[in-house]
Amino acid sequence: MSDLWKAVIMGIVEGLTEFLPVSSTGHMILTGHLLEFEGDKASTFKVVIQFGAVLAVLVLYWRRFIGLLRISPRMLERPGLNLLHVGAALVPFLVAGLTIYGYMKKHLFGPTPVLIGLVAGGVLMIAADRFRGRVTAETMDDITYKQAFGIGLFQCLAIWPGFSRSGSTISGGMLLGTSQKAAAEFTFIISVPIMFAASAYDLYKSREFLSIGDLPLFLTGLGTAFLVAMLAIVTFLNLIKRLSLSWFAVYRFVLALVFVIILYL
């Protein structure tokens, strides 16, 4: 199979899973292992094509992002989501990312850590379903600064591949009193600066072994991820109204079991 076809497959996997609580990074690492698409270039590719999913969020939520740019001295008093909520959620993840992301990428971007993350993340999601707090934030605009910061702390779990950013943040939001839908939409918003920064940082760190000849590969994966993510986001928001997190946890357990059988038995 050519690398371009592998890029298409990886882009589909990324677009489908980025905003589902199932770990897109985990899926791409496992898929890359099956496709024999591994190594330094492949690791960078798996991070960079997340920017395709970022573009999908920007297109679907462009009005909301324009609203976030309206900065006012009364932001602390004014109800509704604003840039300070986003900042409160980003600070913990940025601190954790800058301190341990390099170690995580070097030692944990492999099948076994991903399988552990899938199971551990599934346990967290079941706990969120069972012990969720009283809902005080029905919509994204009801989320408090304290809840936003708490969601940011839970998001740090996503540095471990397999845990899932959306799974961690939605679970954290529910435990802190947000509705499942509010936590999911807030996850979409805060994912944009994080994924953009991660893609740019990884490209910079990988500049020595990438060349202009890699551009078709990266653009193919990015474009595929963008188109698929557009459909996946709308579908997920409909699913999240009907399905509890526990259903996604069951999927994670089954996936982990399947890959244990494929890779180790």
Image (cartoon, helix red, strand yellow):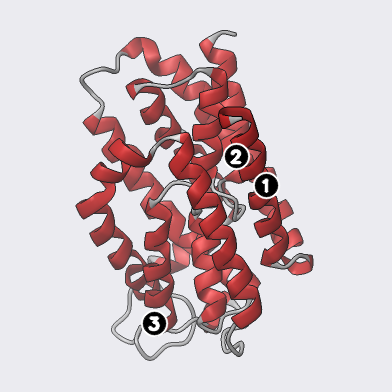
Please tell me whether residue 97 is drawn above or below residue 147 in the rendered image. Answer: above
Residue 64 is labelled as: none
Q: Pointer 3: residues within 10 angstroms few (<14), some, or many (20+)? A: some
Q: Residue furthest front?
A: 265
Visible residue check, residue 157 = yes
Question: Identity of the amino acid at label 1?
Answer: Ala
Please tell me whether residue 246 is drawn above or below residue 47 in the rendered image. Answer: below
Return the disc, 2 or 1, that comes first in the chain's sequence: 2
**Left or right of 126: which side holds 41?**
left
Question: Identity of the amino acid at label 3?
Answer: Tyr
The residue to which callout 2 is attached is 15
Question: Residue visible at 40% across and 51% down?
Answer: 160
Q: Pointer 1: residues within 10 angstroms few (<14), some, or many (20+)? A: many
Marks 2 and 3 sit apart, C-alpha to C-alpha, by 30 Å
Q: Which of 190/29 is in front?
A: 29
Question: Identity of the amino acid at label 2?
Answer: Gly
Q: Secondary structure at mark 3?
A: helix
Whole-percent x, y for residue 182 in the image: 59, 73
Return the disc, 2 or 3, that comes first in the chain's sequence: 2
Residue 232 is labelled as: 1
Return the disc, 3 or 1, that comes first in the chain's sequence: 3
Please tell me whether residue 101 is drawn above or below residue 224 in the rendered image. Answer: below
Q: Which of 159/230 is in front?
A: 159
Instruction: Name the image quarter holding the C terminus.
Output: top right
Whether tag 2 and tag 3 are in contact, CB under 8 A, the answer is no
Whether tag 2 and tag 1 are in contact, CB under 8 A, the answer is yes
Instruction: Name the image quarter holding the N terminus.
Output: top right
Location of residue 85 by image quarter: bottom left
Question: Residue visible at 22% across and 32% down?
Answer: 205
**Left or right of 231: which side holds 38?**
left
